[in-house]
Image: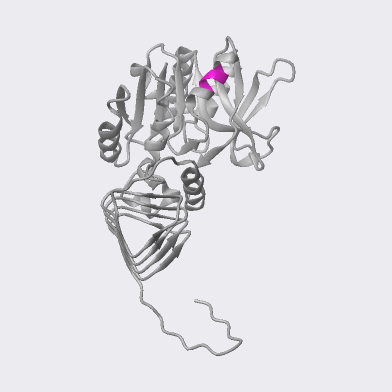
Amino acid sequence: MKVIIPAAGTGTRLFPHTHTKPKSMVYIAGKPIIGHILDRMIDLEPDEIILVVGYRKEQVISYVDEHYSGLFRIQYVTQKERLGLGHSISLTRDLVGDSDIMIALGDMIFKSGYLDFYEQHRKNGHCAGSIGVREVDEPQKYGIVELEPTSQCIKRLEEKPEHPVSNLGISGVYFVQDTPMLFEVLSWMLENNIKTRGEYQLTAALQEMVRRGSRFKIFTVSSWYDCGHAESLLATNHVLLDEREGANDAYEIVDSVVVHPVAIGDDVRIINSVVGPYASVADGTVIEHSIISDSVIGSRTHISKVNLRSSIIGDDANLMGKHNALNIGDSSSIEF
């Protein structure tokens, strides 16, 4: 089985951080998002990983080659125009051939490893493929599947329906065994310019396969972590730090306190500060006279005299505050 990871997007919901890096390279809990995704594929032992890259692709290629080329056989496909998930998958046709595939989105991190999903897919028996789903509170914001009541096969898929008939949200991991049919449908969509909301949607392609007689089943995804915007990125950082094992000792600490869980990179200097809990600090950063918690701090950044909480600071930033002197009387209330 081959794995396709679409990671070509610009990540507009994470601006300004994605002005200078692709979304999959945004740092969280000790490494970029793409690193967490690939870590969870090691037990799966795929035949090959195909990364669809585009926006600032050299950063993704450099990081993945350096850290994962010894673990996986990796190939890259460039999506020059971001025309939708279906379009990105269509570009992998020559590399996939007739192999079974797993599609895993490049901005979703799952609590379970992908091997668990694969075993659930195998238990579904003979079918065109399996789609991971989870019950969601606002189905109009997701791709939704409707099941046949008797066979439990998928009856219909629809992307962000105005009037959803189900609350089973598509989680962002797919197994497809009938890949010739998938690529045939994607080619048909491209040739006939069949778009949904201006894009070639994978959900629409899978729905067309169902219309043509393909039998898809589902498996349950207990939890996923969406890294697509700032609030969810910080929430995911919190969860991943709770799960993190081991610690890095290659940083310098002077008259400071580190409150775990944290992820602190190499060559970080922490001086007269309190860092943590739930702080991620990337390589080469200096923190002095500050208190930082529940935050993500990028590489080679200098932070001084600030109190940060629920914050995201990028690479090569310089954040300087100043201490205040107060003389406060009885029964006072001060807020900064």
In this view of the protein, which residue sits in the foreground, 30 or 215?
Answer: 30
Q: Is residue 160 left or right of residue 96?
A: right
Q: Is residue 7 covered in magenta?
A: no
In this view of the protein, which residue sits in the foreground, 148 or 270?
Answer: 270
Residue 44 in the image: x percent, y percent?
44, 21
Residue 36 in the image: x percent, y percent?
41, 37
Please count the marks in the image.
0
Residue at the image position 54 percent from the left and 81 percent from the top: 334
Give the colour scheme shown: one colour
Q: Relative to 134, does residue 26 appear above or below in the rendering?
A: below
Main secondary structure found in the magenta portion: helix
Residue 100 in the image: x percent, y percent?
45, 14
Q: Is residue 251 left or right of residue 296?
A: left
Q: Is residue 234 left or right of residue 58?
A: right
Q: Relative to 24, does residue 96 appear above or below in the rendering?
A: above
Residue at the top extreme, as displayed: 126
Answer with the quarter of the image where residue 297 lies: bottom left
Name the image quarter holding the N terminus.
top left
Q: Relative to 92, does residue 312 appear above or below in the rendering?
A: below
Residue at the image position 35 percent from the left and 25 percent from the top: 50
In this view of the protein, which residue sits in the foreground, 294 or 10?
Answer: 294
Residue at the image position 52 percent from the left and 35 percent from the top: 111
Q: Is residue 118 covered in magenta?
A: yes
Magenta part of the chain: 117-121
Q: Relative to 213, does residue 196 appear above or below in the rendering?
A: below
Residue 148 in the image: x percent, y percent?
70, 20
Residue at the right extreme, as displayed: 150
Residue at the image position 74 percent from the left and 16 percent from the top: 150
Answer with the quarter of the image where residue 203 lies: top right
Q: Is residue 59 left or right of residue 84?
A: left
